[in-house]
């Protein structure tokens, strides 16, 4: 049987390598910003990050923001998130809303939204904020509406709208 020389595998590998290089170079400039959620707080998956002016954020939007500075050590020590990975939560309250964080649950405008735990799933003590307060202008209250044991505003309080990286719109979740 005669031996046939073909360069097809070489061209396929070269084309894939060139395509990958182009995507890596061009995506940051022209592709949408993507966020990958790897925690149970919200559905796992890929999200597109969409920026808004602070006044355009609404209750019910999933948003991305950095772990509050005072809690970064706790989040990383308990391995809830790797260093530098932002939080993805839902805006449950905005300016003028009344939030009450009680011993066993929290509520927004007198509507119960979820439990508050004294201990995390490993038995370690959770941070505590307690009481009722009105959300100030320029702030939002983040909470996970998908998983009750999420580390969110019920443990660290309201956050400035200026910290938001954007709205997280699901592309592919599972």
Image: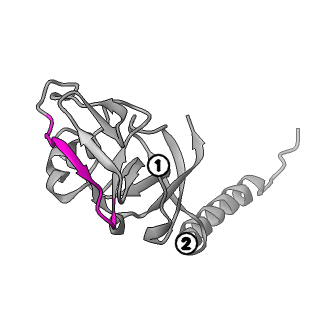
Farthest-out residue, left: 125
Q: Earlier in the sequence, mark 1 or mark 2?
A: 2
Q: Which mark is residue 36?
A: 1
Q: Which mark is residue 25?
A: 2
Question: x, y (%) of residue 122?
Answer: 18, 25
Disc 2, SS = helix
Question: x, y (%) of residue 120?
Answer: 20, 29
Answer yes or no: do the residues labelled 1 and 2 have beta carbons within 8 Å?
A: no
Q: Quadrant of the C terminus?
A: top right
Question: x, y (%) of residue 1?
Answer: 88, 38
Which region of the structure is painted magenta? 126-139
Farthest-out residue, bottom: 29
Cα gap from disc 1 to disc 2, whole angstroms: 19 Å
Q: Which mark is residue 133?
A: none
Image-based side of 103 in relation to 152, left or right: left
Image-based side of 162 in relation to 75, left or right: right
Disc 1, SS = strand
Mark 1 or mark 2, which is nearer to you? 1
Question: What residue appears at the point 22 percent right and 27 percent down from the top-left corner?
Answer: 104
């Amino acid at each position: 049987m005669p031996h046939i020389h073909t360069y097809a595998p070489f061209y396929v590998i070269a084309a894939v390598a060139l395509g990958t290089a182009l995507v890596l170079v061009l995506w940051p400039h022209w592709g949408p910003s993507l966020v990958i959620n790897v925690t149970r707080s919200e559905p796992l998956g890929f999200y597109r990050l969409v920026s808004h002016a602070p006044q355009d954020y609404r209750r019910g939007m999933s948003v991305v923001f950095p772990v509050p500075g005072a809690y970064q050590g706790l989040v990383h020590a308990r391995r809830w998130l790797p260093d530098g990975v932002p939080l993805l939560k839902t805006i449950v309250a905005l300016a003028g809303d009344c939030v009450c964080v009680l011993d066993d649950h929290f509520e927004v405008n007198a509507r119960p939204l979820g439990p508050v735990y004294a201990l995390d799933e490993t038995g370690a003590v959770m941070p505590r904020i307690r009481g009722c307060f009105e959300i100030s202008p320029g702030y939002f209250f983040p909470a996970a509406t998908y998983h009750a044991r999420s580390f969110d505003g019920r443990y660290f309080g309201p956050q400035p709208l200026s910290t938001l990286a954007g709205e997280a719109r699901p592309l592919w979740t599972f």
